[in-house]
Amino acid sequence: MSKDNVDQQQINNAVWAACDTFRGTVDSSVYKDYVLTMLFLKYLSDVWQDHYDEYQKEHGDSPELIEELLKNERFVLPKSANFYSLYEKRYEPGNGERIDKALHAIEDGNSSKLRDGDHGVFQDISFNSTKLGDEAQKNDVLRHLLEDFNKPELDLRPSRVGKKDVIGDAYEFLIDKFAAGAGKKAGEFYTPMDEYLDLVRELEIEERIVLRDEFIPSTDVKYYFSLADLVTQPYRTATQSGVSQIAYHFGVPMLVTDVGGLAEIVPHMKVGYVTPVDEHAIAEAITDFFEKDRAAAFRKNIREERKRFTWEAMTTRIIEMSREVNTLSAIIRSV
């Protein structure tokens, strides 16, 4: 992609697409901070690299002189805090810890701009947080995020994008997007909604599709689950899902993808389906459900399976655990 055909909309779309990494893992009110922070880090790294290349052309192989010149940049970028250093190590364990250290190093190197007393601008965000899942899931999510921001569309070097205020415009675009959805959306699309609407029109199935993406009040949830034949949850990433528990309550069969802990509460071919994160596998399962008329059998199994999620079952298990702990304590005291 050349400098001449770069426009702000391409950059905005690429940044918005990077949000896909977090959808289904954390709420947009949380992941917006991760995306905006990574955007800043990438832009800072690209500006720094662009200026380094310019100085290298002017002064040749004089690393000491170049380092001195770079100290006069608007922002100082420690070597370890460079986006590309983090990207090169994306397959290694510890992505979250490395990103946090990079951000803190940037704060320390630019304290007059990025600190207000003892409070740094990145103090309230951690890429090493359990909000992003367990260690393996977190590392995978952040690897994808680093790869999203390494795409050609997000090469933000000034020599490539010119004098556009790409960082300001992208920030404004994202904030508007997040604000538009705050407290209003029940779900999010992994790609622009218009792509789905175009596909519906192309397949001429408008009369068979009811699309509702607004917030559904709790008082109306029962109507949706009561009308459903199969509750389908095609997550790309997830930890758990409260939707499955609601489906159990209303006795509705489920389909979940095999991510996080979803499969643990949806026994495959007993109360529904567990499929890979693959559109063909999902489509085959849905087809199987209707063609082989599995609804009655699944609903019967749900009535039994959901007993393990009752308050009675939970309190019984707590009492059992208490007895086990007391027994173990007695044994330890007698030794």
Image: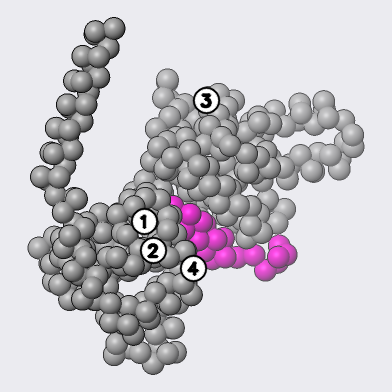
- Which circle's residue, 4 or 3, is located before the other in the chain? 3
Q: Is residue 66 above or below residue 247?
A: above
For residue 6: magenta? Answer: yes
Q: Residues within 10 Å of mark 2 (few under 14, many from 20)?
A: many
> Where is residue 187 drawn, in percent x and y?
31, 63
Q: Of the residues shown, which amino acid type is indicated by label 4? A: Asp
Q: What residue did someone put label 2 on?
A: 274
> Would residue 286 be found to the left or right of residue 111 on screen?
left
For residue 133: magenta? Answer: no
Q: Of the residues shown, which amino acid type is indicated by label 2? A: Val
Highlighted magenta segment, given as a residue range? 1-22
The residue under the point 46% across, 72% down is 281
Q: Is residue 320 above or below residue 198?
A: above
Which numbered tag is attached to residue 263?
Answer: 1
Q: Which quadrant of the rendered structure holds the C terminus?
A: top left
* CA–CA distance in space, label 1 to label 4: 15 Å
Q: Secondary structure at mark 1?
A: helix
Q: What residue did someone put label 3 on?
A: 112
Task: Determine contact: label 1, label 2, CB under 8 Å.
Answer: yes
- Which circle's residue, 3 or 2, is located before the other in the chain? 3
- Which circle's residue, 3 or 1, is located before the other in the chain? 3
> Where is residue 227 drawn, in percent x and y?
17, 76
* CA–CA distance in space, label 2 to label 4: 11 Å
